[in-house]
């Protein structure tokens, strides 16, 4: 948006340019290495984004390595709410391999049932 016309249109729509730093790739990329230091920021990423493709494996890796209950639950929900059909396989695999905590298993099973009951929403 560097052109003068784009800047004027942007301003006309009551937006303003703000100088910010680049987002931390460890956070936006859901790197398990960013835990626990950036746990709150990663939780916000999980809450506010939908994931598909290779990012599903990153969500899975984050879930498995996270210690915090909230982060693990948000990662599991992110998998369950993904529109990518591969997400169901990842959840099933987590269950089969015993990589979920006992208290997480009911949520995983409910997310799989929801996906089966409402396939058109995916």
Image: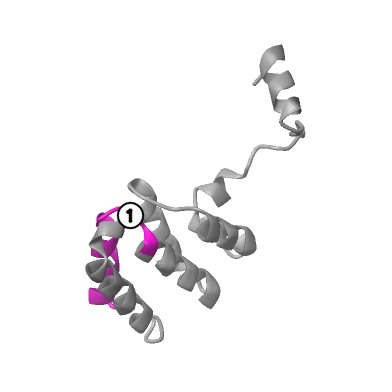
Q: How many marks?
A: 1
Q: Position of residue 83 (x, y in %)?
A: 33, 54
Would you say residue 93 is visible in this rendering?
Answer: no
Picture quadrant of residue 96? bottom left
Question: Which residue is at 74% across, 19% downward?
Answer: 8
Q: Is residue 2 left or right of residue 16?
A: left
Residue at the disc numbered 1: 83
Residue 102 shows up from this direction: yes
> 97 and 56: which one is in front?
56
Q: Quadrant of the C terminus?
A: bottom left
- Image coords of residue 57 (percent x, y): 35, 55
Q: Residue at x 70, y 26 (%)?
A: 10
Q: Position of residue 39 (x, y in %)?
A: 60, 63
Q: Is residue 83 magenta?
A: yes
Q: Main secondary structure of the magenta part?
A: helix
Q: Examine the structure image and report whether residue 45 is included in the region drawn in magenta.
A: no
Q: Residue at x 61, y 45 (%)?
A: 24
Q: Residue at the bottom extreme? A: 102
Along the viewing direction, whichever of 6 and 111 lies nearer the viewer: 6
Looking at the rendered structure, the secondary structure element under dot 1 is loop
Left or right placement of residue 84 versus residue 20 in this view = left
Is 3 drawn above or below residue 44 in the view shown?
above
């Amino acid at each position: 948006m560097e052109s003068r016309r784009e800047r004027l249109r942007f301003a006309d729509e009551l937006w303003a340019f703000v100088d910010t730093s680049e987002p931390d790739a460890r956070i936006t990329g859901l790197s398990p290495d960013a835990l626990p230091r950036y746990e709150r920021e990663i939780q916000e990423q999980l809450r506010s984004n939908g994931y598909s493709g290779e990012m599903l494996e990153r969500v899975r890796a984050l879930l498995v390595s996270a210690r915090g209950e909230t982060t693990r639950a948000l990662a599991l929900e992110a998998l369950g709410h993904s529109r990518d059909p591969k997400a169901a396989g990842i959840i099933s695999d987590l269950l089969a391999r015993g990589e979920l905590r006992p208290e997480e298993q009911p949520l995983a099973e409910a997310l799989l049932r929801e996906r089966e009951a409402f396939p058109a929403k995916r």
